[in-house]
Image (spheres, coloured by chain):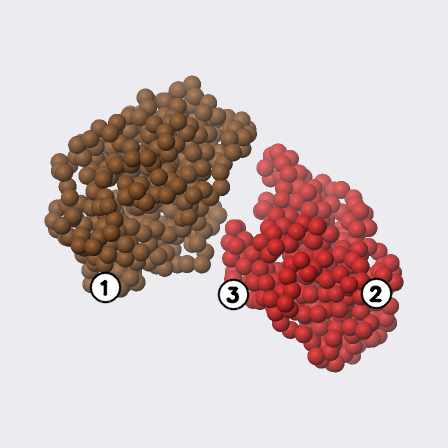
Amino acid sequence: MNVPARPVGIVGYGAYIPRYRLPGTEISKVWKGTPSPGPVKEKAVAGLDEDVITMSIEAARNALARAGISPHLLRAVWVGSESHPYSVKPSGTIVAEAIGALSHIQAGDWEFACKAGTEAFAAAMGLVGSHMGDYALAIGMDTAQGKPGDDLEYTAASGGAAFVIGPAENSLATIDAHYSYVTDTPDFWRRADQKYPEHGQRFTGEPAYFHHIASAARALMDAAGLKPEDFRYAVFHQPNEKFPNRVARQLGFKPEQTKTGLLSPLIGNTYAGSSLTGLTAILDEASPGDRILLTSYGSGAGSDALIFTVQEALLERREAAISTQAYIDRRTEIDYGTYVRYRTKIVLG
Amino acid sequence: MENNQSDVVIAGIGQTPVGERWDVSLRELAAEAILPALKDSGGLKPDVIYIGNMLAASASRQANLGALLAEDVGLNGIEAVTVEAADASGGAALRMAYMAVVSGAVDVALAVGVEKCSDVIGSRFETHLSQMLDADYEAAQGLTPISLASLLFNRYLYENAAEHSHFGGFPEVAHANAVSNAHAMFRSPLSGEHYQAQAQQSEKTLTIYDLAPFADGAAAVLLTREDKLPRDFSHIPVRVIGSSLVADSLSIHDRNTPLVWDAARISIERACRSAGIMPKDLNFFEYHDATSLHAAISLEMAGFAPIGKGWTLANPAGIGLQGQIPGATFGGLKARGHPLGATGVYQAVEAALQIRGEAGKNQVPDARVGLIQSLGGMAATAVAHVLSY
């Protein structure tokens, strides 16, 4: 269990979910010939003029609004994603400049499949917790790539969240403890020259998702001396609707603890943004004193588990930015052809 | 063909849980079955190991399993070799072990079935699996074992005026029996409604509920002659009283009729004849239910139902543990899982448990004589054994 020397917390948070929605039936109509439902109802799709950088900027502005601090106070801007627009050229510097952060800071990108966001989050905890800076911005954001016709196309979605991490005394929710669990488990990958990732089908289940999430969550709860009933909320990485529900059940959580943070049925799997976006939905409704467990999962593979306790300041500051639910409600349905155009699935020469 | 009242007995059995065993390799899986089988015998050491396996050479890129497995379980220096007959490989390995012991060539023989299907995934697995068909005339046309079985199913329904809904009892009984089998892959009941909904949607083709899951698993059976059993042998010795392996045309189009599987029929006739029994003397029949069609045809070939009427037994009164001819007593291929080259040895382990009276909740009442049959592909190879009290 990792607890920073200096107590830290979430000082500001903000989500961003693009407005376009592609229903699963649109995909099955094209690839299966019948409009049968997919593993989630629909997924959020970034528009023509959106990418991980623009969406990160949106989420970061929301986080800064709730933090109520000047961007000049940020000591780091870190973006975790598996769909950075550039292979070489950081997203972090563009985001930092766009939100008005200063030049003498850390800025860069994190990569760990769907765990890239919480990896950035843990680094920000370390930076603040070690007094190297007072505030750091950690973002998990993706425009996830699903190969046309692949099972993952139904869920691979766009969206994510940003967090200003800072001193616990100025936080909306304290970060009480962190634990990370990683192994070399090749369940899902994309080589540098590939457009779409490959996956090991059911191998992505038991030995990958379930093993890592359960290992991380159990170890952290044991170390912290806490049980599932000690938490008001829990949120897990959400590649679909079934997996997070099953792992929650395995760990002993009840549906009323997980329903608020379970967004995949409505927006799909936002990869590096997935569990973090769920956390923003929880913070939108949580009350002071509520304890929250978050456990991410990234293929390749690993999980970060985090425990938060909501503080009084949340009540004053959460209205300072648009809620996650408002983003979910802001919905424009598109057809498969529009999706293909928006996500540049057709390569024109 | 042997005509004997052989004193070949099953001295030890071992089996692993069937499923997607991502965390173990082929050799670990085999050891998980072999070591308990040796222990179960009270310490007998085999003179020879016959390994039933279909896919290791292509899917796991591992040939020469005899050397691999003998060393892995600490039996360097003994005779050990792979036997391959598609998904009848396990039955074929058992047949070799039986012949080695009954002939007097060796005193103790170990039949091991092992398959590590999950070393390949997705459509690549279908490519490996389709090796059980005729590569030139069937697989090259895009046929897979499942699609071929489904085409035959379509023909079966047409010829026999049967309906898809009639076959639901096969998977339902299999799943019901697997619930209490700790080694089974699917330990949950299958509701008739689920089956019928799918059958209604796919009137003429097999659905997922008709198909046994290809899975990882290993099973082992140690054979010896009764006089070689340790003095303190703690089980009822299960005798192998009939054994037969028959090969038919590999391609369906080379057979007189696609829905009469001669090798399946003849292997049972020969095994029962060498055992000196008639099929009506059998207390149970572990058939090769790779698909619901395989189950129906197997029952027909064994004479339990007229040709084209095997599905009439697809209900608890027909094949349930208390039924006319109990089958899939531990879940069968459908619910215990189908680890290809290991399946035939699983059948022997399960039949031994029945006859020993150690089958627990899966016990067939008064199980004294049982038939097991393993089919390779559409019964291009058929292996039958009769086991007795």
Find residue A56 and report its image quarter.
bottom right
Task: Identify residue for label 1.
Answer: B76
Kind of element beneath mark 2:
loop
Q: B360 above or below B201?
A: below
Mark 3 in CB contact with mark 2 (< 8 angstroms): no
Amino acid carrying label 2: it is: Glu
Chain coloured red here: A
B67 or B23, nearer to the observer: B23
Crowd band around label 3 with a 10 angstrom C-alpha radius: few (<14), some (14–19), many (20+): few
Comes first in the chain, label 3 or label 2: 3
Kind of element beneath mark 3:
loop
State how far apart marks 3 and 2 are (Cα). Answer: 41 Å
Q: Residue at x 64, y 73 (%)?
A: A2
Q: Residue at x 22, y 46 (%)?
A: B237
State how far apart marks 3 and 1 are (Cα). Answer: 33 Å
Q: Residue at x 17, y 34 (%)?
A: B274
Task: Identify residue for label 3.
Answer: A184
Colour applied to chain B: brown
Q: A10 above or below B358?
A: below
Kind of element beneath mark 1:
loop
Task: Identify residue for label 2.
Answer: A312
* Chain ID of residue with mark 3: A
B128 or A122, nearer to the observer: A122
Q: Have a look at marks 3 and 1 and say if they share a chain.
A: no
Amino acid carrying label 1: it is: Asn
Crowd band around label 1 with a 10 angstrom C-alpha radius: few (<14), some (14–19), many (20+): some
Query: Which is in the foreground here, disc 3 or disc 1?
Result: 1
Mark 3 in CB contact with mark 1 (< 8 angstroms): no
Percent x, y of residue B67: 26, 60
